[in-house]
Image: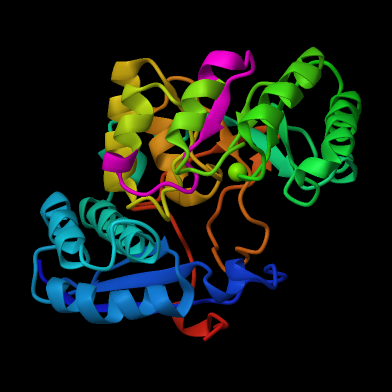
Amino acid sequence: MQITDVRAIQPAGKNSPPDWRTSMGQILVAIDTDAGITGYGVGGGGLAGQHVVRTVLRDLLLGRNPEQISQLWHEMYQATLAFGRKGIAIMAISGVDLALWDLQGKREQLPVVALLGGTPGTKIPTYHTAWSTEDLSTAGEHAGYKLHLGKIAALEQHDLMVDSIEQARITIGPSPLLMVDAWMKWDIESTISIAREIKPFQIEWIEEPLSPDDLAGYAILEEKTEIPIAGGEHEFTSEAFRPLIEQKLHTVLQPDVNWCGGLTELIKIYTMAKEAGLRVCPHRGCEIWALHAIAALDPQPLAETGRPWMTWVEGQPDIHQGMIEVSDRPGFGLLFDERRLPLVN
Ligand SMILES: [Mg+2]
């Protein structure tokens, strides 16, 4: 089989936030082959991500065998090294990598979960991410809930944050898991202080309190906070996860498969984390791209609800009574008509 074309577009999602999540938002990568099979993946980076796919990556991929996923990943990484390594170039590679895995599944007539040794139809518990305590009360049934503090995470709002976390625990009741996400807006001192204050509310983890670059800060937090620290949503490539894992800087690792380098990198992160005895809980795991890996590779599976504005991704399984079931359709199991997708640009 040979690759005959590589395309990238940015479909428009309903009510996507009017910020970088639209302007630099998710892109659809399509890889055509001479066997008449097309693989689809989702990466990131908006128009800039599309440009990386349409130029450097397409030049590299045309005429190549799409089954050599690891080799192609390595060549894409090398070809983007001068301007890549993290951020948009790796987001673009992620979309290509996922399209290659989708092709592999379609070629073998197997869902990706089966390619990874897992079982189609596996049910996975879900957790819902909410941006306010009011949103939590209408979130439906889930195994857990995460309060995203992005809108109120400035440190001068310390008391408001602690009050909101207490209110979140009251709203969901004593049984479900409760997590909080600081979205890289705290510092070491405030994280230690807030962690102490919210401990009575049974918090499963505190997510991304510091910048992903502050490894020294995370080393201090792992020692000084009793609540587990989660992170990795804004990290790129398995090599960048290596120090996080080897130094045990996070208790829960949260790679985003559409950004971190695709499924090829997520598999390596799962393998390293397993050896270190750490947990992986991929960012927005209910979206189809990470769900197959969670079903096949995760000893403690838990899937985060997806972004509500990814409305153009059809074939996404529904959540029933706090559980989501991985599809048995070939590849990632997506169903859509590429020609009818509304585009951002
Ligand atoms: Mg987060």
Report the residue at 87% width, 40% height from top. 133
Report the residue at 56% width, 45% height from top. 284
The quarter in which the N terminus is drawn is bottom left
Report the residue at 28% width, 28% height from top. 271
Q: Which residues are magenta?
A: 222-240
220 with respect to 170 (left or right): left
Q: Quadrant of residue 104?
A: bottom left
Report the residue at 9% width, 69% height from top. 64
From what the image shows, is residue 31 above or below residue 131?
below
Is residue 118 visible in the rendered image? The answer is no
231 with respect to 128 (left or right): left
Is residue 127 visible in the rendered image? The answer is yes
The quadrant where ligand 1 appears is top right
From what the image shows, is residue 278 above or below residue 337?
above
From what the image shows, is residue 117 above or below residue 274?
below
From what the image shows, is residue 261 above or below residue 198?
below
Inspect the magenta stretch and tell me whether residue 225 lies in it: yes
Horizontal and vertical percent position of residue 274 = 33, 20
Horizontal and vertical percent position of residue 223 = 53, 15
